[in-house]
Image (cartoon, rainbow, N blue to C red):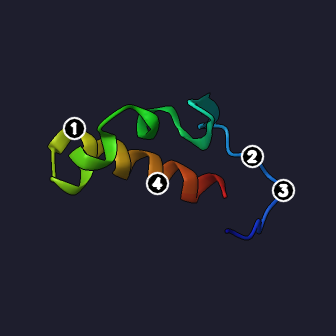
Amino acid sequence: MFEIVSDQMLTCWVAELKDGRLTLAPQEWQRPGFWEDYFDHVPDAVADYDRLKAHIITEA
């Protein structure tokens, strides 16, 4: 349920297939517990998010 708006694959994104689920995101965002840590404001997770978000915006 999403719309593809670009045919460009960002260099920091990787595909992962695990337990029948396909994810496409930076490797750091795919680690177990990342999003829980991010929304709980764990400094390392927030820093990883901010760094990779800036990289994605720059590259897009």
* Tally of numbered tags: 4
Tell me how far mark 4 sits from mark 3, CA to CA. Answer: 20 Å
Near mark 4 (Cα within 10 A), the count class, few <14, some 14-19 or many ≥20, is: few
Mark 3 highlights which residue? 7
What amino acid type is highlighted by mark number 4?
Ala
Q: Nearest to the eye among marks 2 and 4: give it.
A: 2
Residue 56 lies, in percent from the top left, at 56, 52
Residue 31 lies, in percent from the top left, at 39, 31
In what quadrant of the picture does the C terminus appear? bottom right
Query: Cβ–Cβ below 8 Å for labels 2 and 4?
Result: no
Which disc number belongs to residue 9? 2
Foreground of the two, 38 or 12: 38
Q: Residue at x 79, y 52 (%)?
A: 8
Q: First in sequence: mark 2 or mark 1?
A: 2
Q: First in sequence: mark 1 or mark 4?
A: 1
Near mark 2 (Cα within 10 A), the count class, few <14, some 14-19 or many ≥20, is: few
Foreground of the two, 45 or 56: 45
In what quadrant of the picture does the N terminus appear? bottom right
Tell me how far mark 1 sits from mark 4, CA to CA. Answer: 15 Å
Q: Residue at x 43, y 40 (%)?
A: 29
Tell me how far mark 3 sits from mark 2, CA to CA. Answer: 7 Å
Foreground of the two, 18 or 5: 18
